[in-house]
Amino acid sequence: MKLPNNHLKFPDNVEEPMETEVNDHYYMVHGFKFHGVQELYEFLKQNPQINYEVWNRTNLSSITNGFRFAGEPYKKAVEKLISEMDPGYQEFLTIQKRIKAKSGLTHSYKQIKSIAGGTIDPVAYTTGSPEIYRVSRIQKRPKYITIDTQVAYRWDTNKAQVFNRAVILTNLIRALEKNGYIVSVNAFMVVCEYDEVVKAIFEIKQQGKSVNYQSLYKSLVDVEFFRRICFRLIELSNVESKYWSDGYGVTSGENFVRSLLRLKKEDIYFDQPGEMGIQGYDIGSDFEEVVSRLNLEDAIDVEREKKILTDSVRVLKK
């Protein structure tokens, strides 16, 4: 039996396996990319080929994982990607309405006088000034930043930690944009097995556009996303080591991910809840801890944003 060639059938979502240097070592990287969960859903519904060279029909963890660990069965997990009939998701959307998350800011411009180009200034023209034109110039260039968020989390992470991380992330986006940043956001999975890597990128927010709340919530909160959907992506890859079927690889750390994904120094690596100090008991304290760990105290008004966040969540709990 041959390895699947999903990269030939689905070139927009499956990358051709490529040998890539990461931290002075070469890995065969198998990549997936999706512009949100709607595109991921449409891809999975086409039943791409499973790698039966490594897996067999009895050891597909996307199917066999139990409910307590992986949530709803695989087919329901796929449908859940686009379903809005979820109390947790509705609560999440209500919070977003309350904190009024905004899209990216645009450049600010000022008008300056010039001897050429632009539009004629009638006053300057009648007075005989050589600078008779008005030209728009960028007054202050916005700062661009990308937030890359790990979809995996430890088995003992509780639901409140996972939910708080998603809410904090949206409030962090909003706070950065209020202070002149243009923010893009991706969720990612990167797992390794010896010299093979499987990576998947899920777009949540493009620069200058609004957050795709459905993609953010489904990829970062739903337990089925990593333990069924991402496991299925691993099963669809062209990996060759038989060890993949035992543990589905090892989740990679920040240093490896930054090198593999070619993240810039200023880009934000948003780790799993426990690593970000998110405990799940008090969202205000969790928010402060995240800002501190990311060294963003000088980039946003922490106390003001904390109040907006806690007030929004408190209203729901009354």
Image (cartoon, helix red, strand yellow):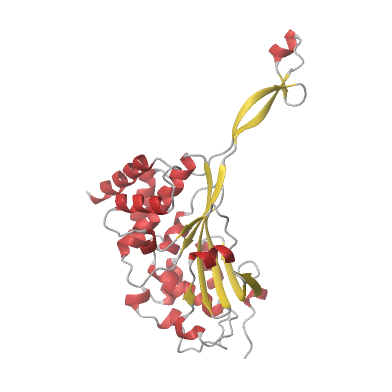
- As rendered, which of 116 and 219 lies closer to the eye? 116
- As rendered, which of 282 and 220 lies closer to the eye? 282
Picture residue at 43% right of the left edge, 48% below the top: 172
Picture residue at 44% right of the left edge, 75% below the top: 228
- As rendered, which of 83 and 104 lies closer to the eye? 104
Residue 160 visible here: yes
Q: How many marks?
A: 0
Q: Can you give x and y, in whole percent of width and height, for residue 165 in the image?
A: 38, 57
**Which residue lies most toward the front here?**
24
Residue 43 vertical placement versus 125 (above, below): below
**Which residue lies most toward the top here?**
127
Q: Can you give x and y, in whole percent of width and height, for residue 5 in the image?
A: 64, 79
- As rendered, which of 219 and 275 lies closer to the eye? 275
Quarter placement of the N terminus: bottom right
Picture residue at 35% right of the left edge, 76% below the top: 69
Q: Can you give x and y, in whole percent of width and height, for residue 12 in the image?
A: 64, 66
Horizontally, is 108 left or right of 122 in the view?
Answer: left
**Which residue lies most toward the bottom here?**
1
Q: Can you give x and y, in whole percent of width and height, for residue 105 in the image?
A: 53, 40
Residue 308 vertical placement versus 198 (above, below): above
Residue 15 visible here: no
| Res 26 quadrant in image | bottom right
